[in-house]
Structures are given as structure tokens and as C-alpha cells.
Image: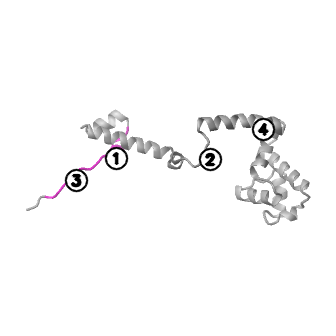
Amino acid sequence: MEYLEALGQTLREIRVDAGLKREDCSRALSREYLASVERGRQSISIAKFRSLCDCLGVTPSIVLFTVEARLASLSLGDYQTKQSGELDEYLKTGRLRSEFSAGAIQGVRGKRAENNRNAIQKLQSEGLSKIEVSRKLGVGTTTVDRYWLKTNVTPDAN
């Protein structure tokens, strides 16, 4: 079973169990669009998915949890046990946090750029030339030029 098909079936079951017709969810999605999503023929944006879940009175995470359990061919209880272990591991290693990570906001390129800047300026302060810094760090001379601290040049006063 494909993900979209499992998602559609799960959404349909929740809607029917709630006693709602497709028309009752028209604030979130048109009747035709919802029918297509429920058949697994149409993908749904996160914003529309969240709006539909609000209409159905269920959180998006519970819907996705159910879909994932079905795709893994596990009961919800077994899947919960498996996910609980994985979540504990992610929390223990710091890969998931309740608050935003400054490093993640900066991104991989931002971290690398900061590391390059620090290394270039350290080697510059040790008296190495731009070419030596470039070779030692394995970066291009353009990168070295970008982070090389410029010395203040004062014009001659006559």
C-alpha cells in the first residue's frame, strides 16, 4: 500500500467515524478534492492537512502515526512501543529537542563558513600567507580572501 493511499483511507475512516459527510469538511477542502485525497489519488499540503484534521477533531500527528503503523503492518500499540524507543534515543542523543537549535537555524553551510572563518583568521594571526592558509586548510583562495582580516591602512598626512 502506498503512503497516499494509506493516508486517504485513514482520513476517510476518521471522517466516517466522526459522522461527517465530505460536505461537512468544505471549509478545509472541496468535496471533490477530499474525495480524491481519500482515494489516495491526490497529495495534500501540510496547511490543508492540518485544516482537515482540525475539522475532523484529530491532531495531524495522530493521523500520521496511524498511517505509519499501518504501513509497517503493526498494531497501534506495537508501533507506539517501537516509536517510544526511537524517540527516547533521539532525545538522549540530542537529535530532537523541544526548542529550536541555533545550529540548525544557521545550517550546515553556515557552520562550515564559521569554521572556515575562524581557522583562516587563526592562521592569519600566526603569520601564514594567503596561499599557505589555502593549502593548509584545503580551501580556495577566494574563500581565504573572503575571511582574511584587512589591516587598517591610514593615508599619509602631509
Point out residue 136 in the picture as x, y percentages from the top left corner. Answer: 33, 33
- Residue that badge 2 annotates: 98
- Using residue 75 as the reference point, say whether residue 99 is left or right of it: left
- Residue that badge 1 annotates: 147
- Residue that badge 4 annotates: 80
Q: Residues within 10 Å of mark 4 (few under 14, many from 20)?
A: some
Spatial CA distance of label 3 from label 4 is 62 Å
Residue 129 on the magenta span: no
Callout in the foreground (1, 3): 3
Amino acid at circle 2: Ser
Q: Is residue 106 above or below residue 20?
A: above
Taking the view exactly as shown, the residue that stands out farthest to the left is 158
N-term-proximal mark, 3 vs 4: 4
Spatial CA distance of label 3 from label 2 is 45 Å
N-term-proximal mark, 2 vs 4: 4
Residue beneath the point at 81% across and 34% down: 78
Residues tagged 1 and 4 counted as in contact (Cβ below 8 A): no
Amino acid at circle 1: Tyr
Q: Residues within 10 Å of mark 2 (few under 14, many from 20)?
A: few
N-term-proximal mark, 1 vs 4: 4
- Residue that badge 3 annotates: 152
Amino acid at circle 3: Asn
Residue beneath the point at 78% across and 63% down: 28
